[in-house]
Image (cartoon, rainbow, N blue to C red):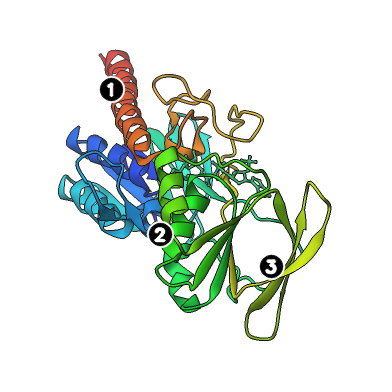
Amino acid sequence: MAEEKTYDIIIVGGGPGGLCAGLYAARARRKAVCLEKYLPGGQIAITGEVEDYLGFELIQGAELGQKFRDHAVKFGLEIEMEEVEEVYCDGEDRVARCASGNVYRAKAVILATGGSPVKLGVPGEQEFSGRGVSYCAICDGAFFKDQVIAVVGGGDAAVEEGTFLTKFASKVIIIHRRDELRAQKIIQARAFDNPKVEFLWDTVVEEIHGNDKQVTHLTIKNVKTGERSELPVGAIFPYIGFHPNANYVREKLEVDAEGYLITNYKMETNVPGIYAVGDVRQQFVRQVTNAVGDGTVAAVAAEKYIEELEDKHAQRVG
Ligand code: NAP
């Protein structure tokens, strides 16, 4: 049966930013809950290896996500498996309504919902999703052992996950629309040094084809020459960026041109008591390191905000 539960702070999303906010909220002795619809850890839970989080030279993303979760829970953060459908204000309360019917009330809410992969938007993408089209190398790479895998994009995710996929693939072909990558140089160097990674420059995917079992080939086009050709592959992993997951808030939050939430230096949105951290907010870089920094700031700011509300009420009573 649906329940209504009251907390001091609600955190929506259990990635590094959300869990770090939860750790700080719990350490401030606030009753805090993190609502996560899938796995605590967020995107790193589905990332192969992480080697740029200070103190961990090399760790599996899933293991780091589990460590973040365990650490926050040890200090008192509650984690509930819930899909939040709507966040809204009800007087001073900040409310999260979930698909389960449960309703969570608090004085502050921290939005830490990251983003979802951008789709290529080409014919065959949806049809072959789960049958050779995947957005998660660590989840699905092993299904394509000894096959040729295409990866699309030229950013950190495409090049890093493309290199990771060589663990399984006979060959990984990274298809990029320009002739220069935007990925960090160290990530690029590793891919260039890997004999199983090939690049197709100035090329876009126009269509994904397959049979009743899986993807068989792609129609690709060279954007400089206009020439079209067929590329036989067993799978395709598009890594062409992501959209922020921010459209579940009823209040009108300020966003930038791409839909990322705009916050001030306290991680507060334009609505008091609603904070945003990590990849869902407008950022210069999107790394685990700055997501946890955001989480720290938002939790401390939310704690001060609640204290001020409590002081205001105490004065009224006094
Ligand atoms: P990204 O940095 O935005 O790169 C997206 C790539 O996809 C770009 O190369 C872009 O091409 C290409 N692209 C965009 N739209 C396309 C389309 N319609 N068709 C074909 N190609 C298209 O995205 P990301 O790699 O997912 O990374 C997102 C954020 O997470 C970044 O801030 C990144 O630094 C961070 N991240 C970091 C790590 C790490 O540090 N290890 C790992 C993963 C992600 P153009 O270059 O031509 O624009």
Number of other residues with Cα within 10 Å of mark 3, as a class: few under 14, some 14 to 19, many 20 or more: some
Q: Residue at x 65, y 55 (%)?
A: 119
Quarter where residue 52 is shown: top left
Q: Residues within 10 Å of mark 1 (few under 14, many from 20)?
A: few
Question: Residue at coordinates 62% horizontally, 73% vertically from top-left?
Answer: 233
The residue pinned by badge 3 equals 126
Of all residues, the one furthest to the left in this rendering is 74
* Earlier residue among tags 2 and 3: 2
**Could you say whether the residue bearing mark 2 is in a helix, strand or loop?**
helix
Q: In terms of depth relative to the viewer, which is nearer, 109 or 22?
A: 22
Q: Residue tagged by mark 1?
A: 307
Percent of width and height locating residue 20: 29, 40
How many circles with numbers are drawn on the protein? 3
Picture layout, residue 200 above or below residue 307:
below
Mark 2, mark 1: which one is toward the viewer?
Answer: 2
Q: Quarter of the image for the C terminus: give it.
A: top left
Residue at which label 2 appears: 46
Asked whether 186 or 288 is in front, the reply is: 186
| Nearer to me, 59 or 176 | 176
Q: Residue at x 25, y 49 (%)?
A: 68
Give the side of residue 147 with respect to residue 30, left or right.
Answer: right
Give amino acid for label 3: Gln
Q: Give how far across and how far down residue 251 sits, in percent.
A: 59, 33
Whether disc 1's CB lies below 8 Å from ligand 1 is answered no
Is the residue marked 2 within 8 Å of ligand 1, measured from its CB? no
